[in-house]
Image (cartoon, helix red, strand yellow):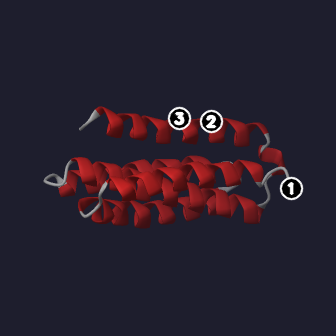
Amino acid sequence: MSLLLILIFISYLIVCFVSYTFLYKVKNLIGYHLGMNLAMSSSGVIGIAVGTVLGYAFPAHYTAITIITTVIALVIGAIFGALVDYQTLLSGLSSGVMAGIMGPMIGVIADLGLIAFCTILVYLTFGMLCFSIRS
């Protein structure tokens, strides 16, 4: 795995952690509908992006990459869903399963242009999730 892909992967985790810490500070302002959007969007976009990067980097290890990506997306969905209640946690888990399984499928056929698109999508999605709390 090249240094660029490692930096992209680490940047996904950093933007996820920073977004979670911001949202945790204002979790009392998060309603049920926003909580569902937070859980499903975060686990969905992380599952697709991480699966794309890892699938591109290790196309021969498809089964292991799918399992790793699904676990990462499940954890992200559970963490963001736990900000509100158990129903949003369940929504984050179900979205994480779907995205974790789909991400490596995209990654096996991906090129650097698609990885750049997924990276921009991660940054925009987490930015919008944090900005949505202010309105």
Question: Residue lying furthest front in this view?
Answer: 113
Residue 111 in percent (x, y) is at 29, 57
The vertical placement of 72 against 2, above or below, is below
- The local secondary structure at tag 3 comes to helix
Let me know if residue 89 appears in the view: no
CA distance for labels 2 and 1: 19 Å
Q: Residue at x 28, y 65 (%)?
A: 105
Q: Which residue is mark 3?
A: 14
For mark 2, give the secondary structure. helix
Q: Residue shown at 34%/36% (left/top)?
A: 4
Quadrant where the image shows the C terminus: bottom right
Residue 26, given in percent of the width and then of the height, sits at 79, 42
SS assignment at label 1: loop
Compared with 68, 91 (above or below) is below
Amino acid type, mark 2: Val
Label ID, residue 18: 2
Identify which amino acid the numbered label 3 is placed on. Ile
Residue tagged by mark 1? 135
The residue sitting at the left extreme is 60
Residue 6 lies, in percent from the top left, at 34, 35
Residue contact between numbered discs 3 and 2, judged by CB atoms under 8 Å: yes
Residue 17, position in %: x, y?
Answer: 57, 36
Pointer 3 or 1: first along the chain = 3
